[in-house]
Image (cartoon, helix red, strand yellow):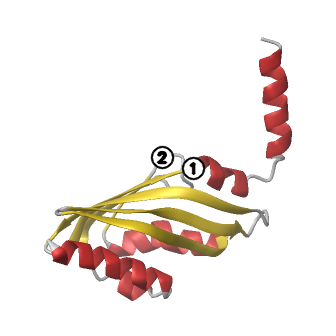
């Protein structure tokens, strides 16, 4: 199953180069790409055009310097797991974030059948929020103390 591991590894290398065409090499017209509920681009997108429009184009529009840093890549045959973190600065708020993330790739013959993202969506939401999260947290803490 080295072809599966190598395809995902090549996808991440293309991402590091900001090479969208390279990132899409293992994606097929039937690939199901799922962004986690609570993530700003949550949903399931099918095929390269939908994935680019629904995820990557929106990330580019909303973030400066958005990146995924791969820390570990695990080969489980038909499943490949990428563990790392996202970084970026939200254009609308100027707030930066670092969020832990896991990607689970379901693969066959070096092609992606399905992708599923699991992320610390709270960190992303905080960066995108125009409100004062510190104030909200302090208010919640004060409310908890009265219970």
Relative image position of residue 107 (x, y in whole percent): 20, 66
Measure the alpha-carbon separation of dots 1 and 2: 8 Å
According to the picture, the residue beneath numbered tag 2 turns out to be 37
Specify the quadrant of the image occupied by residue 44.
bottom left
User: Do residues under tags 1 and 2 come within 8 Å of each other at their CB atoms?
Assistant: yes
Res. 47 image quadrant:
bottom left
Reading the image, the residue beneath label 1 is 121
Q: Is residue 49 left or right of residue 53?
A: left
At a point 46% along the width and 70% down the height, the residue shown is 70
Q: Earlier in the sequence, mark 1 or mark 2?
A: 2
Image location (x, y in percent) of residue 33? 35, 61
Of tags 1 and 2, the one toward the viewer is 1
Which residue is at a point 80% across and 53% down the rendered structure image? 130
Q: Residues within 10 Å of mark 2 (few under 14, many from 20)?
A: some
Query: Where 132 sits versus 53, above or below?
Result: above
Residue at left 48%, top 67%? 55
Left or right of 94? Residue 118 is left
Badge 1 local density, few (<14 within 10 Å), some, or many (20+)?
Answer: some
**Is residue 27 in sight in this rendering?**
no
Asked which secondary structure carries label 2, the reply is loop
Residue 89 percent location from the top left of the image: 70, 68
Task: Give residue 124's position: percent from left, percent from top.
Answer: 63, 55
Q: Quadrant of the C terminus?
A: top right
Q: In this view, does 133 lie to the left or right of 63?
A: right
């Amino acid at each position: 199953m080295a072809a599966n591991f190598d395809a995902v590894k090549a996808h991440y290398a293309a991402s590091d180069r900001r090479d969208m065409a390279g990132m899409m090499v293992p994606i097929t017209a039937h690939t199901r790409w799922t962004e986690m509920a609570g993530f700003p681009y949550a949903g399931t997108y099918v095929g390269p055009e939908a994935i680019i429009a629904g995820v990557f184009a929106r990330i580019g529009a909303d973030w400066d310097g958005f990146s995924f840093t791969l820390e570990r890549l695990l080969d489980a045959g038909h499943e490949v797991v990428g563990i790392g973190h996202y970084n970026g600065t939200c254009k609308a708020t100027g707030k930066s974030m670092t969020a832990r993330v896991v990607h689970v790739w379901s693969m066959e013959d070096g092609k992606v059948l399905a992708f599923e993202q699991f992320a610390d969506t709270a960190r992303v939401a905080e960066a995108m929020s125009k409100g004062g999260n510190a104030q909200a947290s302090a208010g919640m803490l004060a409310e908890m103390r009265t219970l």
